[in-house]
Image: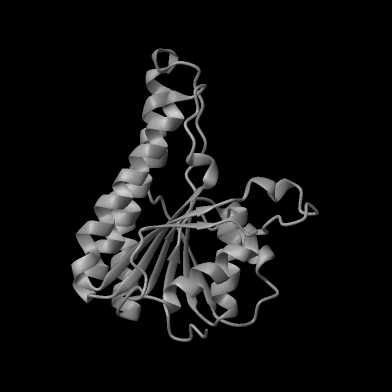
Amino acid sequence: MSLTGKIAIVSGSASPVGLGIVRSLLQQNATVIAPVKSSDEIALLTQSLGDISSGKLITELTDVQEYEKMADLVDNCIEEFGRIDIAVAGFDPHCTSPCLTDVKPGEWEKIIEGTLNKFFVFAKTILQKMKENKQGLFVSLSNTDHLPQKAYSPLFNIVSKTRLEMAKVFANEVKDWNVEYHHLFVDNAPLKDKQKPGSITPEMAGPYLIELFGQKGKLSNLFKTFLGR
């Protein structure tokens, strides 16, 4: 479907799946705002997406973990475009620890700031504006690897479960404001072996997300799974 005139914000846009989603949105003529943390990520996006002539890519050098910076980015977006139609919160990083008692305080703080706080700030600032405008689709992503319990990493279990609980709360809070929230589990485990039969590619997640946007108002389940098979 054409996304001409639609405004999207994609975090984690420099990851393989994030790049695939941005590519799909641009190909459908959307305007895509990509918050990035470094000039290297800007160069990666520019180089990887340089072959696309449709749509418009706007890179914003900012720290999505910092509430005021993210709030400013969202406010500027609303001021310029009037709304946000699609928002995508990318993958959270893996974290491992044999025992929770062995986790160092600095490591704990890094995980909270780098994963849960980043997700909270990104979602809160955007969903607040979507509620005010009474429209929008918000999709958070994680790997299907987050579904099973990992006996060797209680820290991973805590972080992944907490983020899923946050998704449930956000979805419930915005459902009466014509804002749709979905959490998409993407099976990207075979990405390193692109020749494996049935393996998904990063580009496959984008069309699926666009399909969700096209079915807005018709889907009730919060959690979706895209296996690519």
Q: Residue at x 52, y 85 (%)?
A: 2
Q: Residue furthest right?
A: 195
Question: Which residue does the image show at 64% across and 58% down from the upper left?
Answer: 44
- The answer to which image quadrant residue 220 occupies is bottom left
- The image quadrant that residue 89 belongs to is bottom left
Q: Is residue 132 above or below residue 105?
A: below
Quarter placement of the C terminus: bottom right
| Left or right: 189 as drawn, with respect to 68 | right
In this picture, is 153 found above or below 52? above
Q: Quadrant of residue 128?
A: bottom left
In front here: 212 or 97?
212
| Number of marks in picture | 0
49 sits to left or right of 64: right
Residue displayed at 53% across by 51% down: 38
Q: Position of residue 150 (x, y in %)?
A: 50, 28
Q: Nearer the viewer, residue 55 or 148?
A: 148
Q: Residue at x 28, y 58 (%)?
A: 171
Asked if residue 66 can be seen in this view, the reply is no
**Any part of residue 217 in sight:** yes
Q: How is the image coloured?
A: one colour
Q: Position of residue 90 (x, y in %)?
A: 48, 53
In this image, 54 relative to 184: left or right?
A: right
152 on left or right of 117 = right
Task: Report the residue that reaches farthest toward the top.
Answer: 101
